[in-house]
Image (tube, helix red, strand yellow):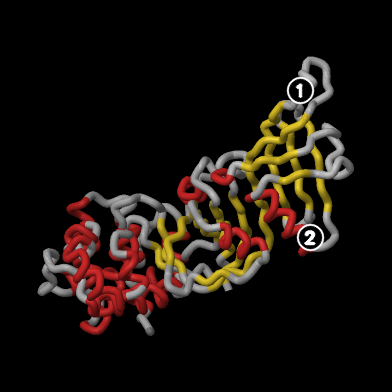
Amino acid sequence: MEIEKAVYAVTRLINVAGTHMNAFNRKKYVKEKVALLDDNQKQSLVKVLKAVAMLVYGGEMEILRDPSKFDDLMAKGGATFNHPWVQIASMVILQTIQAADPSFDENDSPTPEDYIMAKKVLTAIGSSSTPSGAVTDLDPDVRPKKPEHLSGYDTLYRGLKGVSDRIIRRVSIKKPWSIKHGVSTSYEKRTAADFAGLRPDGTASGGGPAVFFTINNPEKKGFIADTLSDYGEYEVILSGDFQINSWILSARGRMSGIVNAVGWSKSPVGLHTLMQANSETMEIKFIYKPLKKIDVLTFDDNQLFLDAIDKYAFNQGKFESDKLGMPNNISKWVPSRGSVLIAADVTLI
């Protein structure tokens, strides 16, 4: 669906206002900027903000992804999922919708038609790009703290945790990743890293398997929704497809074996070990933390490399004595499934 640039421009102005205006001045500013739109644009603005509210809230996600489930969920749970707008939307979104449509009742709940429309809207706004000139045309005096608040961001981040093995494998084979339905991303790396549970050593903090995307966004696409939300997640709604360029998979685990070194027992011991696999070098490193030493497995066949990763990320692995050179008698690797994280560099195409 086509949404006019003026609608996006107004949302960016309102978003910027949230970075420096108090609640009273922002409400007044919202009314002034919404008044610049014609009736059709105001209707589009209402549809956009309803969709944004439902996505950011998160409690409506199942029905948002598949609106055909509305009647079934209502029959099973009544209003347990279909909350009123006053609970779903932030105060500024409610104020903006009411400025555009005075008949809007915040105590109403989303209808099946709202969900159907939201699914279309999220695809459209997530793939949109808005030049800063379209924003300054409506307010030449706007002064954002960051220029990206007007023009959009060329680097975004997304974190996922508790994903299936299949998702990790999908990223590792660099299969294009579709987000055409519209998803939440962040322009702050730390926010997305927290969602994935990303630790400094590249592993997940117990909530894995996990995925962390660094998204190259050369056309600065996406709908900036950060101060339109009550959650403070520096949010940008994005849709399209990711081309996966490269990745590093990390996992914590233990190596078991007899370590022949001064001060070590000759009985089998477990060594805390960090495993890292790099798609560009096709190397798998085993970093033995207590010994501060490293073993490296190098592959010249991509399928053998991927097979080895699948084995070492999710299964206990036994090694031939000639594969691991140091300590040269280590025999078994036991990974921690919850620590598995794949960090991928991707480009929105």
Q: What element carries label 1?
A: loop
Furthest-top residue in this view: 263
- The residue wearing badge 2 is 304
Q: State yes or no: discs 1 and 2 in contact (Cβ < 8 Å).
A: no
**Image depth: mark 1 or mark 2 in front:** 1
Query: Where is the C terminus found, in terms of image quarters?
Result: bottom right
Which residue is depicted at the point 29% across and 74% down? 69
List x then y, in percent, for residue 215: 56, 61
Asked whether, in this view, residue 338 is left or right of residue 124, the answer is right
Q: Which amino acid does label 2 sit on?
A: Leu
Asked whether, in this view, residue 270 is left or right of residue 298, the answer is left
List x then y, in percent, for residue 286: 75, 40
List x then y, in percent, for residue 210: 54, 52
List x then y, in percent, for residue 135: 38, 70
- Report if residue 95 is visible in the image: no
Asked whether, in this view, residue 43 is left or right of residue 174, the answer is left
Please name whichever residue, 76 or 4, is drawn nearer the observer in this view of the structure. 76
Is 125 above or below relative to 81? below
- The residue wearing badge 1 is 267
Please name whichever residue, 111 or 9, is drawn nearer the observer in this view of the structure. 111
Which residue is depicted at the point 14% across and 65% down? 106
Q: Residues within 10 Å of mark 1 (few under 14, many from 20)?
A: few
- Report if residue 288 is visible in the image: yes
Q: Is mark 2 on a helix, strand or loop?
A: helix
Asked whether, in this view, residue 54 is left or right of residue 286, the answer is left
Furthest-right residue in this view: 322
Residue 85: which quarter of the image?
Answer: bottom left
Which residue is depicted at the point 55% across and 59% down? 155
Q: Which amino acid does label 1 sit on?
A: Ser
Q: Residue 280 carries which label?
A: none
